[in-house]
Amino acid sequence: MDISVMEITTIELRKLTAAKGMILTNGEAYGKEIYLGKLDDPENWHEITDEEYEKSIEEESKNVII
């Protein structure tokens, strides 16, 4: 008789939260809350203002080829 045993795993989540009026970015992705991947480093992220974010998105949309 094969009896399965439940496996319990503990994981560590690392979450960055932007200050009020700020957005987190690593130059490619943006967000108010960022959950870091296993190999990501908080040093890869920095805050920009909401206005800088809007300007960045506007510039990126000009480069989209349809």
Image: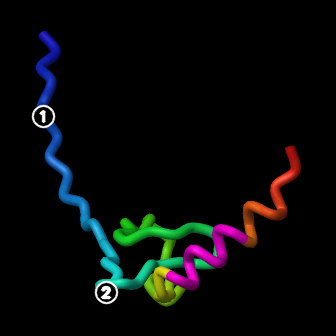
* Kind of residue indicated by mark 1: Met
Q: Classify mark 1: helix, strand or loop.
A: loop
Picture quarter with the C terminus: top right
Q: Quadrant of residue 52?
A: bottom right
Q: In whole angstroms, how far apart are the C-alphas of marks 1 and 2?
A: 40 Å
- Residue 29 lies in magenta, yes or no? no
Q: Position of residue 36 (x, y in %)?
A: 41, 69
Task: Give the magenta part as a residue range.
Answer: 51-58
Q: Is residue 44 left or right of residue 18?
A: right
For label 2, count other residues whose C-alpha is less than 10 Å away and answer few (under 14), some (14-19) or many (20+). few
Q: Which of pointers 1 and 2 lies earlier in the amino acid sequence? A: 1
Q: Position of residue 51 (x, y in %)?
A: 53, 83
8 or 42, which lies in front? 42
Q: Residue at x 12, y 31 (%)?
A: 5
Q: Which label is found at residue 6?
A: 1
| Residue occupied by mark 2 | 19
Q: Residue at x 44, y 79 (%)?
A: 23
Q: Is residue 14 left or right of residue 63?
A: left
Total marks shown come to 2
- Residue 57 lies in magenta, yes or no? yes
As drawn, the residue found furthest toward the top would be 1
